[in-house]
Image (cartoon, rainbow, N blue to C red):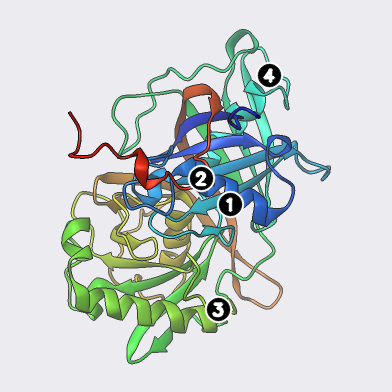
Amino acid sequence: MTGPVEIRCMLMRGGTSKGAYFLAADLPVDPAARNELLLRVMGSPDEQQIDGLGGAHPLTSKVAVVSPSADPRADVDYLFLQVAVGQPKVSARQNCGNILAGVGPFAVERGLVVAGERETSVRIRMVNSGDFATATFPTPRGHVDYTGDAEISGVPGTAAPVVIEFAPGARKLLPTGNVRDLIDGTPVTCVDNGMPTVLVQAAALKVTGYETPEGLEEDLALAARIRELRLAAGTLMGLGNVSNATVPKVTLLASPRHGGAITTRTFIPARCHTSIGVLGAAGVAAGLRVEGGVGADLAELPADGDRVRIEHPTGFLDIESSLGTDSAGRPTARRTAVVRTARKIFDGTVFPRSTEPAPLSAATPGGPR
């Protein structure tokens, strides 16, 4: 009789998310077998994920799969997988810029990249979209140092900064070809700066945009309207039927209240984010700079400089964002960069839940004693 399966795993906080990081070589090559295994690792499908690593929320049910890259433009490949909490689903249809913050340090920890004596830059190919990013972080004496004085909203304390600069993508910033689209009478701006995102004024959906995430999630009429917008926008953006996908995200916009450029509430896709994703914020920042976009008359953009401060439920996120134009005069993302932090939480082996359900006889009659 063989013993329990165990897999090398590192649990890390990346930005305002938390996930399990694996070397691709430690997981099955077949995507279906890999996904089935990860569901058991994370404890899905179960709303509490009580029998796995997941934390009962989309922000803590994430996986990074990292491997050496065959592309000369990158050091490592990073595949992001969103593991559903209450459903047996694993999605590879989106990137995650927060989990991305831990990929560089993980690559050094696993020996995929040789650390510099002061800092290390890791070139990363995001497999989900084919985009590229470079993460730079401190490695004094050739070792990753997670301690530092960088602070990001939504994370207690401070940590070492991870500076992420995204290479300009080849995709259309406005995937529908329009600055504005009208979906059932509601004006939206569909933007893709690394993450397909639908921008809509909160007031157009009869909310203020300043509500708590919990309050917005309890609004069933709002949930139905956001689902309608997502489905229609998915078709307009060339994503097809997105009823079972996690993208596009929908971000509600309202005037800033705390000195930023805009206030946001983002749905991922049904739960309301307690902050905002890095690539979602990159989409918002770029969308605000598109003349005539739905957030243009709400935003208070800085007079000079590229930094855009995005307000969210637990604070703010600063994005360096600037636009250019292509040969046809259409807006394109010229530069996108952000500062995040990451931290290694544990490194060891994880024991996936067995594929066989526990027999009924295992329960003690009369309950616990």
Residue topped by disc 4: 115
Q: Which is more toward the observer, 54 or 228?
A: 54
Disc 2 marks a residue whose amino acid type is Arg
> What SS does tag 1 mark?
helix
Disc 3 marks a residue whose amino acid type is Met
| Label 4 crowd bin: few (<14), some (14–19), many (20+), radius 10 Å | many
Q: From the top left corner, tell me how far across and down residue 301 is, in percent.
A: 35, 58
Q: CA distance from mark 4 to mark 1?
A: 34 Å
Are the two marked residues, 1 and 2, in contact with CB atoms closer than 8 angstroms? yes
Q: From the top left corner, tell me how far across and down residue 345 is, in percent.
A: 44, 24
Are the two marked residues, 3 and 4, in contact with CB atoms closer than 8 angstroms? no
Which numbered disc covers residue 237?
A: 3
Q: Which is more toward the observer, 136 or 206?
A: 206
Q: Earlier in the sequence, mark 3 or mark 4?
A: 4
Number of numbered discs overlaid on the protein picture = 4
Residue topped by disc 2: 40
